[in-house]
Amino acid sequence: MLEARGLTKEFDSGTHHLTVLRDVSFRVPQGALVAIVGPAGSGKTTLLGLLAGLDTPTRGQVLLDDADLTAMSEDQRAQLRGAKVGFVFQSFQLIPTLTAIENVQVPLELRGDAGAASRASALLERVGLGDRLDHFPSQLSGGEQQRVAIARAFVNQPRILFADEPTGNLDGATGARIVALLEELNRESGSTVVLVTHDLSLAERTQRVIRLSDGAVVEDRMTGSGVHEEGGVPGLSTTEDTEISAGGAAVSAPATAGGASAVAGAVRDPEAS
Ligand SMILES: Nc1ncnc2c1ncn2[C@@H]1O[C@H](COP(=O)(O)OP(=O)(O)O)[C@@H](O)[C@H]1O
Ligand SMILES: [Mg+2]
């Protein structure tokens, strides 16, 4: 379960006072696949940073399972990110001097995971790059680099994965394939996936769309598509419906239990838009 409670983010620059997020609240059940949409500057990246524990709100709380991220020290949040959070950036953020398989192994090696090489190659196989293990990022297309970045973000089976416009630098068809891959991995792993996109047709492929405008949630609705439309996820059980209030409207979100809990590294994206 991920919950935002009354999240408000303000910036003060001496002369200017800027409210970037206004009282944002929602709950995302474990295993869900959610899209956050909104125009440039509406606060999507800021919100993702708060939800992932990379930044702290001016007011409000972020709850990830039983932990209140906003009550933690920076070190505690870093530890929690390492244990539970994966992050995929628009600009891929692969390490240029490492091959595809080495990039995917990085989070595992940070944990001292002995089976790193075989897990990394299995996951690259899974994202369709089994024949690209030893390619450097410069030898891969944009879509291939993003698939490596997704493999890296999933390699520790994070409880929750955030993706900030992961299709932003890709053409439409490649972007659709990236979202389909996130969908499949979400279904297989039980990881919650929170996807930021300004592409509405991609957002409609997820289960739920949360729309931001000028820092406020102006829409929160189920799409009718996604993994739950055919009666749930094999191997996982749909156990509860969660009431979500958004702008006065109550919508119902299916919750998926079970799945993965492990570790993935998250780093700050210096180029995040
Ligand atoms: N560190 C910051 N200091 C001041 N303003 C910021 C900072 N980070 C973001 N903003 C402002 O917050 C607003 C929302 O930014 P952002 O979350 O990046 O939007 P989006 O990802 O939806 O394009 C923008 O107007 C941006 O200029
Ligand atoms: Mg952004």
Image (spheres, rainbow, N blue to C red):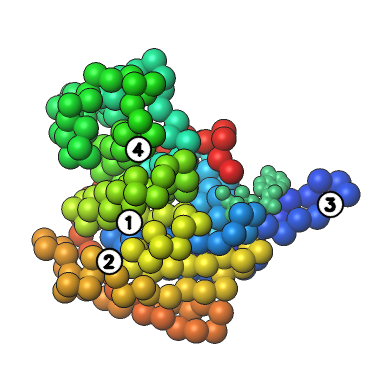
- The disc labelled 4 sits on which kind of residue? Gly
Percent x, y for residue 134?
Answer: 24, 19
Comparing 121 with 203, the one in front is 203
Mark linked to residue 192: 1
Check disc 3 and report its element: helix, strand or loop. loop
In primary-sequence order, the first of circles 3 and 4 is: 3
Looking at the rendered image, the disc whose residue lies closer to the viewer, 3 or 2, is: 2
Mark 2 and mark 1 in contact? Answer it, CB < 8 Å. no
Which of the marked residues, 1 or 3, is nearer the chain's N terminus? 3
The disc placed on residue 181 is: none
CB under 8 Å between discs 3 and 4:
no
Q: Give the mark toward the camera: 2 or 4.
A: 4
Which residue occupies the foreground of this view, 266 or 225?
225
> In the picture shown, does residue 94 fall above or below 192?
above
Residue wearing tag 4: 143
Could you say where residue 3 lies in the image, as x and y percent from the top left?
45, 64
